Image (cartoon, coloured by chain):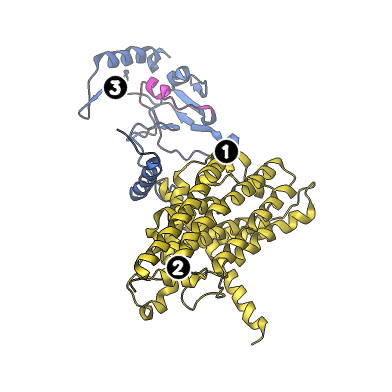
Amino acid sequence: MTRIFGTGILRSLLLSFRQQRRGTITVQYPRERLVLPERARWAVEIKPHEGVEHTCTGCRACEKACPDYIIRLDITINEDRSKVIDLWHYELGACMMCGLCVEACPFDAIRMGHNYELAVTDPADLCVDLLVESPAHEPKRKVAAATPPPGPVEHGVPVPSTVDSAATESSATPEGSDDV
Amino acid sequence: MSIVQVVVPRVLAALGLMLLNGVVLIYMLRKVLGHLHLRLGPMENGWHGIAQTTFDVLKLLTKEDPTPKAVDKALYFIAPAIVFVPSLMAYAALPFSNSVRIVNLELGLLFTFAVLSLVPLGILAAGWSSNNKWSLLGGMRAVGSQISYEVPMLLAALPVVMMAGSMNLGDIVRAQQPLWFIYNVPAFILFFVAGLIESGQTPFDLAEADSELVSGFATEYASMKFGLLFLSEFSNTFIFAALTVTLFLGGWGIPFVPEAIMQPIAPLVFMIKTYLVIYLLMVIRGTLPRVRVDQLLTLGWKFLLPVSIAWVMITGLVIKLGQTVFGGAQ
């Protein structure tokens, strides 16, 4: 297509006029907020379950899974072999929100939260204690909860993947509360 | 009435118009550029951020006014005034309507150009006295571009003067009653391009090229001294747009609307037209990238100047031919 010399300026101006008719895409943040996608990954938090405070058994799978070594569980084992989580320490400032701890958790105790307003004025506030002085959860069953891992989704329904659940179960068994 | 009673209100009116224009234009620029970028522009202060520039001006007024150590004190302090005063004076000849104007100058067009040609002097003074190589570069560029474009701009306005037969801006507007002079398209384009450069609008804003010269001649200025430089820049934009409207877009007039109806709404029509031209300038500002210095000067000396001289001759020839052919019949 041959173009006349100098018409590029006119075309660019027309483009500018068209852009102005498109309307703005600004989200006025404090007053308007985007809806986060369901699997958005922000700070780790304790996942609420019905009837119990939390489902953490103190298995330390998350601590082992964390690539940044920012999760630390201080656990006391009583004489009756029940466990108390003294501290579920989580260093938000160094977390890269990879979600490996959530994937590793065999009892579905933690999740990646949707709170993205994480700024604090004091760096010390970035060290969060998710659980303090809490008795460890005694799971009813000794295998992991059947949470579908993030996998292929077809027509909105997660495709059941036998390989993944088998892997979760096998990894859960040695990490569970049986071996304590 | 003594001369003071005549002069003071008019100067104050021009000053008020200039300040108001500055405030409105800064807000408008931010809004127009914002919507070009699919943003919103200022939104926080007042309805859709309408009070934003007022607060900006208040901030400028209350800011500390540091003077760099090595500046040339006298020039440094007087330069904003040298820039500001001519662009205030240029409001004098603008005809807002048949009666609303500051003075009715017979050589209004020439006066406006003459006064505006003082602006580069102030800019060079600002650039030189700042003792900063970027400022100096900005000042030199401003002088280089503005002096070389004054000639084509004046030459592009000449066809209009020939067609109207007067340099009085009011007469020029009246001469456009049935048909605006924009039908002289080459003269309009030449005038528009030269005026873009003259008023330092973005494709040719080499004098303050933010990305290369920080902000050019205004770098070392702070507080209201910077405010004056900034204000006179926006004021020059307004004057250029108003001149475009006056010379080519029929000034305060609307074709085929009689004078009696136009009389009360003429200033409004003039302002609306001017602001539409300014809107176009802002869209251009948001669209086109900056040219290089050599491209700018090449465009000026090798293209605009010869073409505008040629167009003056052609227009003159056509007018003379028209007078000989049709004038005899009358």
The amino acid type found where label 1 is placed reads Asp
Chain assignment, label 2: B
Residue B65 appears in the picture as rendered = yes
Measuring 28% from the left and 23% from the top, which residue is drawn there? A148
For the residues labelled 2 and 3, the Cα–Cα distance comes to 78 Å
Reply yes or no: does residue A100 show up in magenta.
yes
The hue in which chain B appears in the rendered picture of the protein: yellow
Give the magenta part as a residue range: A94-108
Q: Position of residue A95 (x, y in %)?
A: 50, 27
Reply yes or no: does residue B184 show up in magenta.
no
The hue in which chain A appears in the rendered picture of the protein: blue
Q: How many marks?
A: 3
Q: Quadrant of residue B262?
A: bottom left
Quadrant of image for the N terminus of chain B: bottom right
Circle 3 Cα neighbour tier, 10 Å, few/some/many (<14 / 14–19 / ≥20): few
Identify the residue under disc 3.
A151
Identify the residue under disc 1.
B294
> Which structural element holds mark 2?
helix
Residue B41 appears in the picture as rendered = no
Measuring 49% from the left and 41% from the top, which residue is drawn there? B289
Circle 1 Cα neighbour tier, 10 Å, few/some/many (<14 / 14–19 / ≥20): few
Q: Position of residue B241 (x, y in %)?
A: 48, 60
Measuring 43% from the left and 50% from the top, which residue is drawn there? B283
For the residues labelled 1 and 3, the Cα–Cα distance comes to 59 Å
Q: Nearer the viewer, residue B10 or B152?
A: B152
The amino acid type found where label 3 is placed reads Gly
The amino acid type found where label 2 is placed reads Ala
Q: Is residue B284 above or below residue A74?
A: below
Identify the residue under disc 2.
B164
> Which structural element holds mark 1?
helix
For the residues labelled 2 and 1, the Cα–Cα distance comes to 36 Å
Give the mark nearest the N terminus, 2 or 1.
Answer: 2
